[in-house]
Image: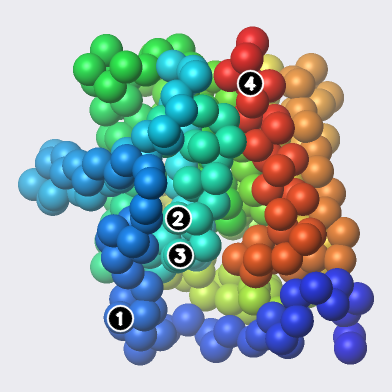
Amino acid sequence: MKYAINKQFGIWRYARQPVMGKWFFKLGEKMVNTQKYFSAIKNIQVANIEHTTPDGYALKSYVITPQRVTSNAVILYLHGGGFCFKGSDAHVANAVKYAEGVGCKLLFVDYRLAHNYPYPTPEEDCILMYKYLIDKAKELGISAQKIIVAGDSAGGNLSLGVFYAACRQGLPRPAGLMLIYPVVDNKMQTASMKQFVDTPMWHAKLNQAMWDTYLPTKESANLFAQNHVETNLYRAFPKTYIESAQFDCLRDEALALADKLQQAGVDVTLNQTQGTMHGYDQVDCQISRDNIQKRIDWLVRMVSR
């Protein structure tokens, strides 16, 4: 095998995704049903909410309330999927684990997808729901000062977008950021991006197709660059958890962000997982369970402050 991916991941070590295109998006929409996954959850309260966006779209989200709530903190969870796929059953399962493990509510945003709504719409949907948590804090029984924004892959980029928007707009900033093998920027210039062009689950060719879909015009690319200028904001970051996967084209983006934040004096917890590929925690195995627990442990420390 070309890459020393741990055998625990079984056949997923060989998984090859086709390059994204309209037919692939349509297939994904039929195969992935976030609402169905939430409907199947037992012994935990899930509230479906719809919030009307400024352009009149009924944006769906799900509020998870564990049986035992011990904190008025809340997690805003933004799932991955290359900006083009809905939250998977594994995303939903992990979100439930975070809520139950921490003992707090979690808001899972079913944001619009890039092949129909390119940038900035998906990010604006997530910012809108961050504001929703602030505005409805008393009604929801949460603290607007204890919102932890978390996301994996593309959801990590959306999490950064929410943080930058909070800074620009003078909103209460997130109490913490949890970035799981995050998409950081669209430069595509890191060593891991150049090396991992054929890795399982995700690779540089797919990453380029993702950016071409998310930022299809010069105007959208310029707006993204304008909204994601982080240089002067490093010191403003809250405590941040960053996780990378060893055989992931996005690995070095995550490591570079962690280094910049640490140099700025930010409290960063960096978890460099080994023997893993992008999206590895979609597979239920001991490595996934161990690292999900590390995320939960960090979240518990955050809400216990």
* Of the pair 87 and 90, the residue shown nearer to us: 90
Residue designated by label 4: 302
Answer above or below: position of 256 versus 210: above
- Tag 3 or tag 1, which sits nearer the N-term? 1
Image disc number at residue 30:
1
Q: Badge 2: how crowded within 10 Å, few (<14), some, or many (20+)?
A: many
Residue type (three-letter) at the residue carrying disc 4? Met
Image x and y of residue 219, in percent? 37, 54
Alpha-carbon span between mark 4 and mark 3: 26 Å
Give the side of residue 255 with respect to residue 184, left or right: right
Callout 3 environment at 10 Å: few (<14), some (14 to 19), or many (20+)? some
Q: Quadrant of the N terminus?
A: bottom right
Q: CA distance from mark 1 to mark 2?
A: 17 Å
Classify mark 2: helix, strand or loop: helix
The way the protein has been coloured in the rendering is rainbow
Q: Which residue is mark 2?
A: 92
Q: Which amino acid does the dot numbered 1 rest on?
A: Lys
Q: Quadrant of residue 30?
A: bottom left
Q: CA distance from mark 1 to mark 3?
A: 14 Å
Where residue 54 sits: x, y (%)?
14, 39
Taking the image as drawn, is residue 252 in sight? no
Q: CA distance from mark 3 to mark 2?
A: 5 Å
